[in-house]
Amino acid sequence: MVWTPQQFGAFLDAAEGDHLYAVFHLMGTRGLRRGEAVGQDWHETDLDAGLITPAKGIVVDGWSPYESEPKTDGSAGTIALDSVNIEVLRAQKARQAKERRNAGAAWQDTGKVFTKEDGSWLHPETVSETFRRILAATDLPPITLRDLRHVSATLTHGAGGDIHTITLTSDTYTSLLPEVDRAVAEAAAALVPRGTTVAKSSGEPPRASP
């Protein structure tokens, strides 16, 4: 089962406001794996340039998480971000800054984009559990968190991009020029219909207009 853009948009509507909303948005549009998403570092995330490089991943051994190299055939690839993802990640950064102030001396400065409320690593299974919880509250066809990569590939293909821009067979990301990748990302984001736009001043992750 692969969700349509409409179904993915409905899931994002249901997930909006959740602590992990930005994780699901990034995975479903740009194809990051679970471990790559929770392992993403801010220093490898350039929101001004609209580029991210998944250079580290957090995976589990039994139940214990550990950091590893990304699951790619070569060095980490740089991925272009569409304008919606940039806004979502800016909102995530603002949310995290607020959590850092609230945590005070208890804050753990891991440098990760997605963390627990004290800044510590986000356990990969927490992302899966949250995905299942949100999905169960909807009428959407059941898929797994891993299937969001297929959603991303579908969006890329529907936007006119090479299906191998986010390759599911060779486990590489993209060899396209960044400007080409960005154009495809923008077109893919436009395929996902969303609900009412949330004011940027609210501090919540914004929705794309239908």
Image (spheres, rainbow, N blue to C red):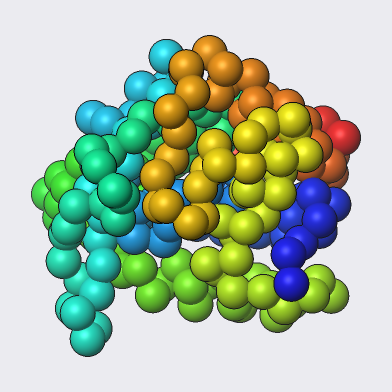
Residue drawn at x 24%, y 74% is 60
Residue 10 seen:
no
Q: In which quarter of the image is residue 194?
A: top right
Counting the numbered discs, the total is 0
Residue 18 rendering spot, x and y as whole percentages: 57, 58
Image quadrant holding the C terminus, namely top right
The spot of residue 144 in percent (x, y) is: 59, 74
Q: Which of 50 and 72 is in front in this view?
A: 72
Using the image as rendered, state which of residue 23 and residue 178 is in the foreground: 178
Q: At x 26% / y 67%, what residue is drawn?
A: 59
Q: In this view, does 98 lie to the left or right of 132?
A: left
| Above or below, comparing residue 176 to residue 152 in the picture | above
Q: Could you tell whether 14 is left or right of 106 in the image?
A: right
Percent coordinates x, y for residue 146 in the rendering: 52, 67
Q: Can you give x and y, in whole percent of width and height, for residue 32 in the image? A: 45, 50
Name, please, the residue furthest toward the front: 170
Q: In this view, does 159 lie above or below 18?
A: above
Res. 126 in view: yes
Give the position of the N terminus as an image quadrant: bottom right
Could you tell me which residue is drawn at 19 percent across and 79 percent down? 61
Query: Most extreme residue toward the left, as rendered?
Result: 105
Residue 49, image quadrant? top left
Seen in the picture, residue 50 relative to 21 is either above or below; the reply is above
Seen at 48% across and 56% down, the residue is: 169
